[in-house]
Amino acid sequence: MVDSRDASAADPPPRHSSEPVRPDSSHTDTTMTFTAGFAAQVAGLDGDVTAEEHGAIAALPSGSALLVVRRGPNVGARFLLDADLTTVGRHPDADIFLDDVTVSRRHAEFLRNGKAFQVKDLGSLNGTYFDGNRIDGVAGLSDGSEVQVGKFRLTFYASRVDLARVASH
């Protein structure tokens, strides 16, 4: 005959669902290594700017801006906007060449008027997006705006000199 006290002592107490599961002693730790490209993508998701990007943005002269690729095949690439017209597309003659089938040959243009910048879609197949919204025609850019061209997501950074002047007025 089995004593019920002996059987209950051998069985573990019932676990309640709110109690955390604790790993047993056979648990193995794993180490993962991430590439610089992955780190740049994560920084883009969080809106973080690397020290090198901070330096490039701080050095922008008045009347210029910088686009930084946050998602897409060339994450971390930077493009200086320092002309009244900057073309974007898959065509090799584009000022900003984005080599991917999601980008039209003549996809968009960045326009500068004094110290203000705009992005203009050129009737591209996949469209141009400004802060998540597809644009028809032209959209004005502000510091930190996101522009999407095909699978590329670019963050716009205005000259700090120009931002300081706007803030002081």
Image (cartoon, rainbow, N blue to C red):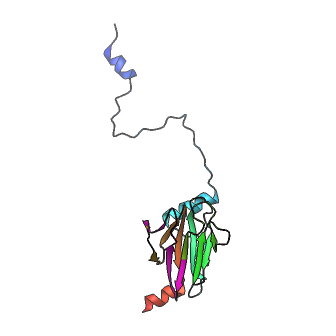
Q: In which quarter of the image is residue 34?
A: bottom right
Seen as rendered, the residue at the extreme bottom is 169
Q: Residue 50's spot in the image, x, y percent?
A: 58, 69
Name above or below for residue 80 compared with residue 4.
below
Q: Position of residue 151 (x, y in %)?
A: 54, 60
Q: Does residue 112 belong to the magenta stretch?
A: yes
Number of labelled discs?
Answer: 0
The residue lying at 61 percent from left, 78 percent from top is: 80
Q: Is residue 44 visible?
A: yes
Question: What span is colored magenta in the figure?
Answer: 110-133
97 inside magenta stretch: no
Question: Which residue is drawn at the image coordinates 53% and 77% (left, top)?
Answer: 157
Residue 27, above or below 74 = above
Where residue 95 sits, quadrant-wise, is bottom right
Q: Residue at x 54, y 87 (%)?
A: 161
Q: Residue furthest top?
A: 1
> Which residue sits at x=59%, y=71%?
88
Q: Can residue 51 be seen in this view?
A: no
- Rendering coords of residue 11 (x, y %): 38, 23
Q: Which of 129 and 158 is in front in this view?
A: 129
The quadrant in which the C terminus is found is: bottom left
Residue 6 point in image, percent of width and height: 36, 17
Horizontal relation, residue 54 to residue 143: left or right: right
**Quadrant of the rendering where the N terminus is positioned:** top left
